[in-house]
Image (cartoon, grey):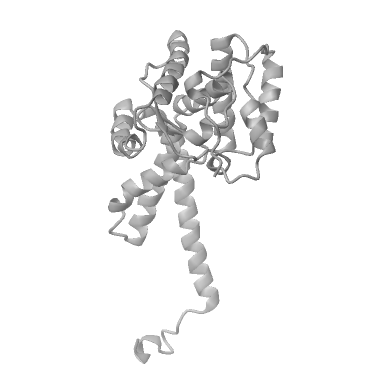
Amino acid sequence: MSREQFSPRNPPPTPRQLLIILGIFAGIIMAIAWGVWLLIDNVVWLIPQSVEQQIGRLVKPVYEELALPSPQQAELNQLLGQLEAELSSSNREKRDYQVLYVPQETVNAIALPGDAIVIYQGLLTEVQSENELMMILGHELGHFANRDHLRNLSRGLLLQAAIGTIIGDPSILRSILATILTNISQAQYSQTQEIQADTFGLELLAAHYGHVAGATDFFARLAKQSGNDWDFLSTHPAPDRRVAKLQRQIKAQQYPIHSTRPLPETLKLSPSKD
């Protein structure tokens, strides 16, 4: 840079001026983020199923390659079908949900665009009754019903596109697929979204069994073992608070609690000794 560029008539910016410029830029980014947040909350319900299915065609093959057909996957889909029957009886929007069972030690469950729920082997080894497994499946169905996965994904993509436009990043479109995969695999929902999904799962559990036994069992055990490095803990809220909220809902709705059913034999897996 030549000396003429910073003459007495055109002095270099002071630290204070640089901070002001940085503050203005940060304010613009925050305003964009807030605008995107509000826009998605109001528009997400207008996104047609066909668009979600198109997104699913980009994402699902990655998990389908990991989820080879197995007796566990067939059994999980049978259980999911029972919950779908409850959705149909309540005149909700008809969908064709499926479980993709991934034989990996990750303790997690994911709702994918395109009506797929990923259940990892690691999560299944921690489940001790059919009821608590159905609660987890019902919870994931709750994210579909509330369109949480689309809401979070759309926010991330629009915010990235808006910022890329401002700073003139020509590679923004090439990173869309990577962003979709990252947002889905590391999905983190707000406390409100998780509470709503738990409420949905609780209602499905009560409708299917006539009681809500097992609704809090998995999360209660998770609270006692929270020192483990589980993906479920990084993508879901603290299990002890979750149990407390569910217990309050059960008491408020006066849901009965009876006995839990054992897991089907094909789903009884032992945790890895590694």
- Position of residue 66 relative to residue 96, above or below, is below
Residue 205 position, x and y percent, is 56, 16
Res 81 → quadrant: top left
Residue 265 position, x and y percent, is 50, 19
Q: Is residue 128 visible?
A: yes
Is residue 27 rendered to the left or right of residue 255? left
**Residue drawn 48% across the image and 29% down it:** 143
Res 203 → quadrant: top right
Q: How many labels does the image show?
A: 0
Q: Can residue 242 be seen in this view?
A: no
Decide which of 34, 69 is in the foreground and name it: 69
Decide which of 178, 93 is in the foreground and name it: 178
Residue 274 position, x and y percent, is 54, 45
**The N terminus - image quarter:** bottom left
Residue 258 position, x and y percent, is 67, 11
Res 40 → quadrant: top left
**Residue drawn 62% across the image and 12% down it:** 211
**Residue drawn 29% across the image and 27% down it:** 50
Decide which of 116, 271 is in the foreground and name it: 271
- Position of residue 57 relative to residue 4, above or below, is above
Q: Residue furthest bottom?
A: 3
Q: Residue furthest front?
A: 273
